[in-house]
Image (spheres, helix red, strand yellow):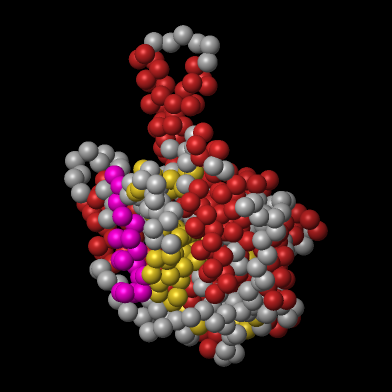
């Protein structure tokens, strides 16, 4: 995308958001208009229509994994949203996880990313003790890629293991079979608490009519083999049958409306207050391509309730800003990379976005303080890594960095991560990247996620490729450009979201709302482990 004619950070951010919306609109078409028309001819709703009908209109629906599979399966015809529409919404006033197979995408077949996305949604339900609703309409595993989805620990079979685990945890699971439910996938609704099936379109069987004919020579039709009447009146597998999808979805609303009140973690919430700055002012903070320093406090003031942000150790470790605040009334501890160039108490300059010994030390202490007080943590990542060089090494940057990583890894309060800009190297780890179990992790549309910055990586890779070779300056430059283009694509938030390294690419002005919804979800899990740190370098 050419940004040469863009002059302000606000304009840059709006261009990025317009591009994101353009891509998202295409994803929302699913398998395309012809596939959607086939659904309509069978009197079936699309996955998005089902979710929309099921959820409360006055409450937000937070979609997760909309960009899953993006540009990953072009050779197979694509897999928009990973073939599944999923997220967190409210049903009869109760916050729930919802997973809906998109039958318009390869008949709802499971690609590798489909499995990863479904497991992510189950993880969200388990971590936050939220009821989970499965809207089933799937032909099963995508056979041409079965080796990448079937046998491994984090593959298809893990879904049913999670069904059993969630049942043991007391997490409500409801399945509505609105289309095909085939082979191993047939276990999912049966391992849920209650199963609903739509007459005419819903079917459940381990092997379809063609496979049955091939295996044992029996001629049988779909309805007799595994239709609504068979499983409701004969096998007893289904608990309810309904003539229409709307009736099935209405029954789910009724079931959820009768659930007992959940035990809560008890995170503190006061009456919400508006931020000091308008939430859309957040667009104005960064510069074009995030190329210049900015004050991260300006971002924080667009997110938190006015007058509630109180900095911790404000004059120490200035390249990380830590502080207590309220976000939509919820108490939260904020750990944010400061992008301004600052001076420490010795008068030494420190580069913004870099973690130094003192900032690592401060952030580790703050993380532990929040655990002591049972306050959820919010990480705002715009980090290029830890400080390097002889002075930092001799001062023990590795042990100070390890101290922060230890604190984040062993933190027991819910963590929420927003990648606002750069997310490079060990800085990603220390600031609660995906590997450190944030309850939710989102990226702004200008985010970059990689082991190091594009220019540094491209030059390093160039030197490796040219070792012992003699090439002209022009050839070097062409090779450098090719390497950088490839690397830049891999640092894109779309590349990350496609692989579910982040849950979604978000509008920065929605950051406050999404953190609030995340803490509300986390509050449903009353179990907070005891904080244990193990061996700590000091």
Residue 420 versus residue 162: which sits nearer the camera?
420
Q: Position of residue 11 (x, y in %)?
A: 22, 51
Judge by depth and name the residue closer to the eye, 30 or 382: 382
Relative vertical location of residue 451 with respect to residue 420 in this rendering, above or below: above
Say whether residue 300 is magenta: yes
Nearest the camera: 5 or 307?
A: 307
73 on left or right of 406: left
Residue 477 location (% of width, % of height): 37, 20
Residue found 61% across the figure and 55% down from its top: 406
Answer yes or no: is residue 47 visible.
Answer: no
Residue drawn 39% across the image and 51% down it: 345
The quadrant in which residue 66 appears is bottom left
Q: Is residue 159 left or right of residue 468?
A: right
User: Residue 35: x percent and y percent?
Assistant: 45, 58
Q: Can residue 308 be spotted in the picture?
A: yes
- Residue 291 x, y percent position in the rendering: 30, 42
- What stretch of residues is rendered in magenta? 292-309
388 inside magenta stretch: no
């Amino acid at each position: 995308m050419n940004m040469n004619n863009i002059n302000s950070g606000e304009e840059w951010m709006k261009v990025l958001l317009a591009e994101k919306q353009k891509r998202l609109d295409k994803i929302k078409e699913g398998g395309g208009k012809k596939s959607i028309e086939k659904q309509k001819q069978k009197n079936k709703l699309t996955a998005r229509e089902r979710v929309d009908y099921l959820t409360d209109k006055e409450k937000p629906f937070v979609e997760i994994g909309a960009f899953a599979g993006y540009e990953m399966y072009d050779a197979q015809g694509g897999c928009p949203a990973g073939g599944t529409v999923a997220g967190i919404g409210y049903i009869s006033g109760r916050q729930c996880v919802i997973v809906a197979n998109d039958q318009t995408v390869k008949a709802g077949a499971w690609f590798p990313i489909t499995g990863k996305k479904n497991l992510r949604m189950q993880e969200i339900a388990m971590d936050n003790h939220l009821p989970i609703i499965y809207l089933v309409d799937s032909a099963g595993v995508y056979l041409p890629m079965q080796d990448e989805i079937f046998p491994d620990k984090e593959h298809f079979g893990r879904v049913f293991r999670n069904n059993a685990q969630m049942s043991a945890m007391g997490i409500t699971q409801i399945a509505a079979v609105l289309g095909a439910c085939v082979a191993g996938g047939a276990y999912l609704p049966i391992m849920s608490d209650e199963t609903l099936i739509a007459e005419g379109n819903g079917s459940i069987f381990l092997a379809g009519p063609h496979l049955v004919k091939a295996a044992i020579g029996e001629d049988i039709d779909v309805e007799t083999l595994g239709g609504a009447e068979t499983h409701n009146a004969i096998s007893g597998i289904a608990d309810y049958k309904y003539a229409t999808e709307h009736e099935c979805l209405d029954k789910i609303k009724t079931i959820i409306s009768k659930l007992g009140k959940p035990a809560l973690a008890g995170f503190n919430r006061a009456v919400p207050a508006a931020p000091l700055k308008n939430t859309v002012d957040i667009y104005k903070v960064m510069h074009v391509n995030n190329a210049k320093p900015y004050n991260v406090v300006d971002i924080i003031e667009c997110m938190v309730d006015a007058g509630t942000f109180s900095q911790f150790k404000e004059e120490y470790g200035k390249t990380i800003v830590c502080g207590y605040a309220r976000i939509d009334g919820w108490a939260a501890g904020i750990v944010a990379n400061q992008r301004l160039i600052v001076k420490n108490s010795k008068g030494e300059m420190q580069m913004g976005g870099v973690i130094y010994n003192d900032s690592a030390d401060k952030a580790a202490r703050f993380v532990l303080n929040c655990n002591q007080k049972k306050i959820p943590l919010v990480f705002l990542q715009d980090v290029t890594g830890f400080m390097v060089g002889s002075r930092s090494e001799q001062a023990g940057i590795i042990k100070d960095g390890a101290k922060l990583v230890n604190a984040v890894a062993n933190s027991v309060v819910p963590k929420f991560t927003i990648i606002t800009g750069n997310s490079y190297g060990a800085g990603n780890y220390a600031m609660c990247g995906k590997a450190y179990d944030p309850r939710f992790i989102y990226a702004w549309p200008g985010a970059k996620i990689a082991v190091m910055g594009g220019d540094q990586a491209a030059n390093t890779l160039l030197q490796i490729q040219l070792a012992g070779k003699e090439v002209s300056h022009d050839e070097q430059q062409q090779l450098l450009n090719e390497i950088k283009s490839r690397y830049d694509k891999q640092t894109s938030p779309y590349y990350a979201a496609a692989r579910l390294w982040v849950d979604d690419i978000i509008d920065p002005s929605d950051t406050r709302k999404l953190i609030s919804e995340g803490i509300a979800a986390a509050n449903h899990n009353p179990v907070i482990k005891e904080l244990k740190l193990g061996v700590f370098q000091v």
